[in-house]
Amino acid sequence: MESHYIQRYHSHNPTDNQCSSAVLKHIKAPVHLVWSLVRRFDRPQRYKPFVSRCVVRGDGLGIGSLREVDVKSGLPATTSTERLELLDDEEHILGVKIVGGDHRLRNYSSIITVHPEVIDGRPGTLVIESFVVDVPEGNTKEETCFFVHSLINCNLKSLADVSLRMAVLQDEVEPIHQCRV
């Protein structure tokens, strides 16, 4: 199923000076909890550990809305301006494009999809985040992809941790009961 989702939702067409990839994370929490965090374009700091503050221009969740993100120290950036490109609550798809800021991620665009699955007999979620970005001058495609992968992996690990805590608090970690014939 993973390759089906990647092929369907995560096809980017990188140019010669861009890199593109996808990162997957299996989360032991129901899809509706995970999606409730991912879909909030106006509140990325709920699960993204490098975001210290977010101010939204526009209605916050409408296509074309902009957010100004302040980045915590430790990364080679302090701000990022991002536009909401896609938000589909039925298919669980969020698309974001970076349109400004003081960082080296030029022409960065990402798609996050959230898919229900069963993990150890319990409701779980497969999250896939793919991206395309320019390779900065002085870097290789491999270095750029490694850097972006590291950021996404950190964000998705945090998403898993927050989602699991929410599931435990809401008592939503019960096994799925199978019907026997």
Image (cartoon, helix red, strand yellow):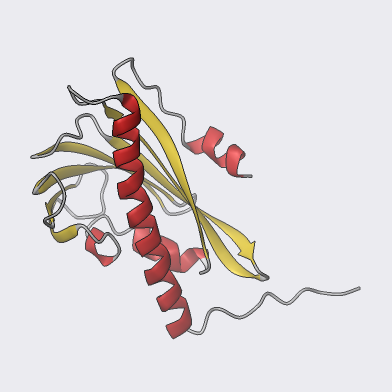
In the displayed structure, 128 sits above or below 16; it is below
Outermost residue to the top: 16
In the displayed structure, 17 sits above or below 128; it is above
Outermost residue to the right: 181
Point out residue 65 in the picture as x, y percentages from the top left corner: 19, 46
Point out residue 140 in the picture as x, y percentages from the top left corner: 29, 24
In the image, what residue occupies the spot 34% across and 48% down? Answer: 152
Question: Along the line of sight, which residue is nearer the eye, 17 or 109?
Answer: 17
Point out residue 114 in the picture as x, y percentages from the top left corner: 48, 53
In the displayed structure, 9 sits above or below 88; it is above
Residue 132 seen anywhere in this rendered image of the structure: no
Count of residue discs: 0
Q: Quadrant of residue 181?
A: bottom right
In the image, what residue occupies the spot 65% across and 77% down? Answer: 175
In the displayed structure, 91 sits above or below 106; it is below
Point out residue 149 in the picture as x, y percentages from the top left corner: 36, 43
Residue 167 seen anywhere in this rendered image of the structure: yes
In the image, what residue occupies the spot 11% across and 45% down? Answer: 77
Quadrant in which the N terminus appears: top right
In the image, what residue occupies the spot 56% across and 41% down? Answer: 5
- Asked if residue 49 lies left or right of residue 154, the reply is left
- Asked if residue 130 lies left or right of residue 2, the reply is left
